[in-house]
Image (cartoon, rainbow, N blue to C red):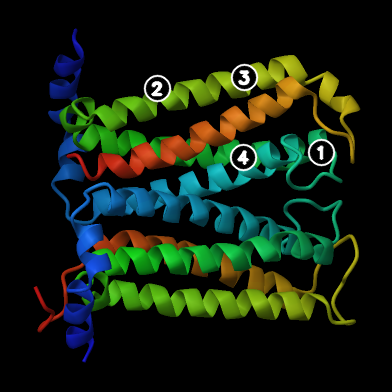
Amino acid sequence: MLTAFALWLRATPLSLAIASHDWVIPAVQSLHIVTIAALIGSVLVINLRLLGLIELGQAVTALMDHYLPVVAISILVLALTGAVLILGEPTRALFRITFWIKMGLVLAASLLTWGLSRFSRTPSAVSGVGGAPVVLKTGAIVALLLWTAIIFAGRWIGYTEGWPGAPQ
Amino acid sequence: MTLSDLAERLKATPLSQAISGSDTLFPLLECVHVLAVVIVVGAIAIVDLRLLGLRARGRDIQELLNQFVPVTLGAFGIGFGAGALMFIAKPDTYLANAFFLAKMGLLTLAGANAVAFHLIFSRTLARTTAGVAAPLPARLSGLFSLSVWIAIIACGRWIGFTT
């Protein structure tokens, strides 16, 4: 079914248009990476703050109010630019295990970030200036590891072979 | 010694052959490089967007620099190290690549801009506290920095499409 979908996608005028212009894929990949910089910059501030390593003069909740909208918009732009990349080469990433690992990690990191935001606003969490509870610190370490793994998985899509039966 | 002599000598080193002879070392270096690049650009963007008055207008610029310059320099060191190892693995390929040479030129510009910024504004920025707009030259420096770093990412990505 995925194969049928990919082959149908590859025959669409938009996919053919992307594939016939050599500059589209590197340009969209560049935009994808610039957006990853916006995302990683934002999650880095949030998680390093939860760990007490940076921006100690700022309240956790204030930083989250400032950076979480950037995270949300970045994920939206990444989904759109990623969709264009798939549209340009429908038989590539969709049939590589690293792409699906990356999608799973993105889901996990996004849910964890949402959870950290919710938890940091509960009365039991420290909402003002100063340290954060152990749960938040552990979550911050896991989040940073997840975002790092996402970048590694993303780079590795290009080094992964399609699985058996993948369309050429 | 010309650049191509240097490339040949680098290629003959055990380090170069170890990286280019391995299936996983080069991709791993790329992963570390990309991670470092996005941290560098993400951290720089936080400061540049404040200079431009587009984000964090309520923050003291010097305070933002104190928080994010160490992050930027640390990540830059890691990214530069990983990039240098990628270069050592295939120096002739990189030296013949126009996007690689453009990226190095842009990096020099970004570095010169950062040094000039710190030399010129390190004293006056103390007056640019929370809520105060940065002086026009500082704003232009931020715009230049942000544009150059986006171009560096594009050149870096394009290297892989031209080798």
Picture quadrant of residue A93: bottom left
Q: Earlier in the sequence, mark 4 or mark 2?
A: 4
Using the image as rendered, state which of residue B59 and residue A1 is in the foreground. A1
Q: Amino acid at mark 4?
A: Ile
Q: Are marks 4 and 3 in contact (CB under 8 Å)?
A: no
Q: Amino acid at mark 3?
A: Val
Label 1 marks a residue whose chain is B
Q: Give the quadrant of the C terminus of chain A.
A: bottom left
Q: Nearer the viewer, mark 1 or mark 2?
A: 2
Q: Amino acid at mark 2?
A: Gly
Q: Are marks 4 and 2 in contact (CB under 8 Å)?
A: no
Label 3 marks a residue whose chain is B
Distance Cα–Cα, label 4 vs label 1: 14 Å
Label 2 marks a residue whose chain is B
Using the image as rendered, state which of residue B20 and residue A75 is in the foreground. A75
Q: Earlier in the sequence, mark 1 or mark 2?
A: 1
In the rendered image, residue A43, in percent from the top left (x then y), is placed at: 62, 61
Residue marked by disc 3: B115
Q: Please tell me which residue is depicted at 37% across the width and 54% down the height of the picture.
A: A28
Side (left or right) of A92 relative to A77: left
Residue marked by disc 1: B63
Label 4 marks a residue whose chain is B
Picture quadrant of residue A134: bottom right
Query: Would you say residue A89 is visible in this rendering?
Result: no
Q: Please tell me which residue is depicted at 53% across the width and 51% down the height of the picture.
A: A37
